[in-house]
Image (cartoon, rainbow, N blue to C red):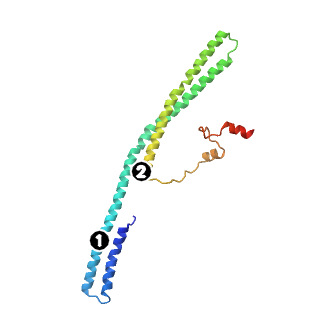
Amino acid sequence: MKKTASSEEAMRQPFDRVRAYVDGKGEHTSFTDVVALAEITADSMQAFFESIDRSIYSELREIADYITNMRNEITQLRAGELKTDRIPKAGEHLGAIVMATEEATNSIMEAAEAMLAAEGEDEATYKALVNDKVMSIFEACSFQDITGQRIARVVETLENIENRIGRFAAAVQTKGEAAAEESERERRARELLLNGPQAKGVAIDQNDVDALFS
């Protein structure tokens, strides 16, 4: 535990009183002087230990408050709920998004291929085919609404997790953390610029790429 200025002062006082008493008596001391010195020492040490007790109690009180606050934050984190409910549901939503996107893509491609492959049909038949396939494409594009709702739920879950972790980090008063060790996959992606799709304003503009090769 960390010593405070008051506790250090309390430690010096007993020895200062004893030293002052001995210096005042010189070389000639009696039994009465020894008894008086013992009384001074006992009184001084009692004050010293009382000061230490107050200091220790104060520090233990701070530790107890910190532990109580930490326990409350851990309760608010609700890790069990995240593990058994929110994160699994987010995974289900992402899986459904992938499946819906795949099904819509297949439907659109099949409709486009059917229109391109139409041959030897009269104008009325071809027009009816095109109308039918275009309607199929429009219906397939409706997946966007459902996937948008699912994505919104996933984002909500991520924000909820972020808020809980942020509040917990603030409670434990974390400071600068060391960077996580880079995995082999991350290193390869960084060195080969395998970053995948980039957000607007982050990715290199196609015009810049064309200018580079021109």
Q: Which residue is mark 2?
A: 171
Whole-number angstrom distance, CA of label 1 to CA of label 2: 37 Å
| Rendered view: 81 above or below 106 | below
Quadrant in the picture for residue 117: top right
- Residue 211 in sight in this render: yes
Q: Earlier in the sequence, mark 1 or mark 2?
A: 1
Q: Position of residue 184 (x, y in %)?
A: 61, 47
Quadrant of the rendering where the N terminus is positioned = bottom left
Callout 1 environment at 10 Å: few (<14), some (14 to 19), or many (20+)?
some
Q: Position of residue 175 (x, y in %)?
A: 48, 54
Callout 2 environment at 10 Å: few (<14), some (14 to 19), or many (20+)?
some
- Label 1 secondary element: helix
Identify which residue is drawn at 61% across, 18% down.
133
Quadrant in the picture for residue 49: bottom left
Q: How many marks?
A: 2
Q: Nearer the viewer, residue 107 or 174?
A: 174
Identify which residue is drawn at 62% across, 22% down.
110
| Rendered view: 47 above or below 165 | below
- Residue 92 in sight in this render: no
Identify which residue is drawn at 49% across, 31% down.
150
Q: In the displayed image of the protein, which residue is found farthest to the bottom?
A: 28
Which amino acid, mark 2? Ala
Q: Position of residue 13 (x, y in %)?
A: 33, 75
Which amino acid, mark 1? Ala
| Rendered view: 190 above or below 14 | above
Q: Which residue is mark 1?
A: 47
Whether residue 113 sits left or right of residue 161 in the image: it is right
Q: In the displayed image of the protein, which residue is found farthest to the left?
A: 32
